[in-house]
Amino acid sequence: MKRILNNPDGRPGARAAQRRLMAWMLALTGLLTGCNLEQNADVDLPVLPAQLVVECYLEAGKIPEMTVTETVPYLSTPTPTILTDVTVTLTSPRGVTETLRFQPGQNPDTRKFFTHRGTRRLSIQPGDTWQLTVTDTKGRRVMGTATMPATVPIDTIEWMFNNRPEPRAMVTVKFQDPPGVGDFYRFQVHNDSISDDPDVEYFPEDRLLDGQLVTLGTSYEFAQNDTLIVSLFHLDQPYYNFLRSINDAQSANGNPFGQPAAVQSTVQGGIGVFAILNYQRRLIIVR
């Protein structure tokens, strides 16, 4: 009876257990309160010399344009630096060299800014290899070579609507892959203008589709009377790797579960891309 009266809940030692639990919780609270869980850490970032950054895409029948900037330290304001002491030359497969003039501007079609521009339209055939050389007064030198891929024509473009009250259209493109593994593509669909980001973009290759009639498509995402610009690029492997690395880096940015990805440049001595574009492009109105 004495044990029961000393333990109103009827369980032997319950009050003592409660006291021990309360004492442990108070001690833990004091410990956590006394700990500073936020700590500042000073990280010394290495100061690396600035590198030249180049971006140049050649197209048959068009005047060449390119952009030259330089890298900035990590965590600094990403303000583009206009370099006025740079010499840019293009060399054709026949050994003819053209110097691109410093003439900053913006392409009206793509809305891309450039720092240097040529004076004549280029004559380029599939299989031609061109060379880019960029130098400045600090002794920096960037070089790159690019080969124009073979032309891969678009066979057919089709679209169909679903049966929803407000129907949406999907678009499919068919083309014949050349025989021989090692063909790389970029498929894009723009709505109304190529100066905006594409509504659809991905990068197929022919490892499993070598020599076959390939079909690429979209989901049901376009409205009636949308004006679409469908583009199929045939890429060389260095440019393909560059594009995929850019896509992977953007996907990993800010994603705690994403694997960091480094950009795979197509040039040596600096950072950036030099490529010759060969693409087929069609404009359609989905009705």
Image: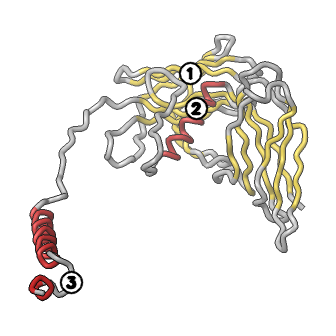
| Residue furthest top as drawn | 95
Residue that extends furthest to the front in the rendered view of this protein: 1
Q: What number is the disc on residue 56?
A: 2
2 or 1: tag closer to the N-terminus: 2
Residue located 26% across and 33% down the image: 47
Q: Which residue is mark 3?
A: 10
Q: CA distance from mark 3 to mark 1?
A: 90 Å
Q: Is residue 244 left or right of residue 154?
A: left
**Type of amino acid at the residue the image marks with label 2:** Cys
Left or right, residue 101 beside residue 186? left
Which of the numbered marks, if any, corresponds to residue 246?
Answer: none
Amino acid type at image mark 3: Gly
- Taking the image as shown, residue 189 lies to the left or right of residue 179, namely left
Q: Crowding near pointer 2: few (<14 within 10 Å), some, many (20+)? A: some
**Mark 3 touches mark 2? (CB < 8 Å):** no
Quadrant location of the C terminus in the rendered image:
bottom right
Contact flag, marks 2 and 1 (Cβ < 8 Å): yes
Instruction: Tell me residue 266's x, y (percent).
Output: 55, 25
Q: Name the front one of labels 3 and 2.
A: 3
- Tag 1 residue: 132
Image point (76%, 42%), residue name:
231
N-terminal of the two: label 3 or label 1? 3
Q: Is residue 119 above or below residue 159?
A: above
